[in-house]
Image: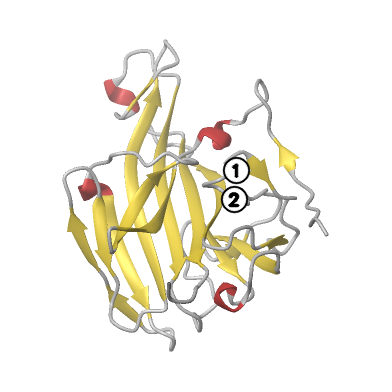
Amino acid sequence: MLRQLSLVLTIAGGLTSAAHAHGIWTAQRHGDIAIVYGHGAGDDAYKPEKVKSAVSYLASGEKRDSKVLHQVKNALVEPAEDAVALTVILDNGIWTKGPDDKSANRPKSQVPGAQSASHSIKINTTILKSGASLKPTGQGLEIVALADPMTLKMGDDLPVQVFADGEPLAGVPLYVDYVNDGHAQSNKTDAEGKVTLFVRNDGLNVIGVSHAKKTPGNAEIDQVSYFATLSFILPHGED
């Protein structure tokens, strides 16, 4: 029986700016774990020094540093031994919209006739193994799985909760399958920041959410724009 899902489908002419946002997630690349920057099937180049942190979490909740390996056009990450989850943060800098509606990776003061400016932060949480602690870590924006995805299969319910600076974030829709169906959104989170999705793929799953925090009194930016993802790969048997 075909599984039904209530989605807000964004069509041409009605796209929000968030629908065009890039996110980051981790994925297997030639036996390594790569930090991917993109939207949908996009896998774009970026300056590896934009990756500002990579933290591994053990089953106990204890944190460990992860090794970030700079490549020419991207970065790889090596989680700590026995890590069950990993959080990566990429600082994409300040983007300012000029009078021609084009955006430049510079602060307002360096763009004559600037209309608006946003500091862009990308955050990813990857669940690597079963047993990860399902708690918020206090990031500017994060999606927390309320069930262990590694014990589920495609089609199973996956309740999640969205947090901003450690507090539940109500009223935001999630991108339910950011890699394969990048414009499909869920219902909005409830008063506790919760919404129930389902596992979309028998393989890589990437769920996304966006949120902007206004910065009144800041001459260089108008807001900090966060895009957070939760990613995991369902385990499979040996070939």
Task: Work out which residue is located at the far bottom of the displayed protein and give it.
Answer: 60
Identify residue for label 1. Answer: 181
- The local crowd at label 2, few if under 14, some if 14 to 19, many if 20 or more residues have their Cα within 10 Å, is many
Vertical arrangement, residue 119 with respect to residue 2, above or below:
above
Q: Is residue 191 left or right of residue 97?
A: right
Mark 2 is on which residue type? Asp
Residue occupying image coordinates x 63% and y 71%: 153
Name the foreground residue: 124 vs 43: 43
Badge 1 element: loop
Residue lying at the far front of the rendered structure: 239
Relative to 207, is 74 on the left or the right? left
Q: Position of residue 20 (x, y in %)?
A: 52, 33
Q: Is residue 87 above or below residue 44?
A: below
Tell me which corner region of the image, top left, top right, bottom left or bottom right, holds residue 77. Answer: bottom left
Q: Which residue is denoted by mark 2 in the rendering?
A: 177
Instruction: Give left or right: position of 238 versus 34.
Output: right
Please tell me which residue lies in front, 148 or 49: 148
Query: Residue 44: percent from the left, percent from the top?
Result: 34, 39
Secondary element type, mark 2: loop
Q: Are marks 2 and 1 in contact (CB under 8 Å)?
A: yes
- Residue at mark 2 to residue at mark 1: CA–CA distance: 5 Å
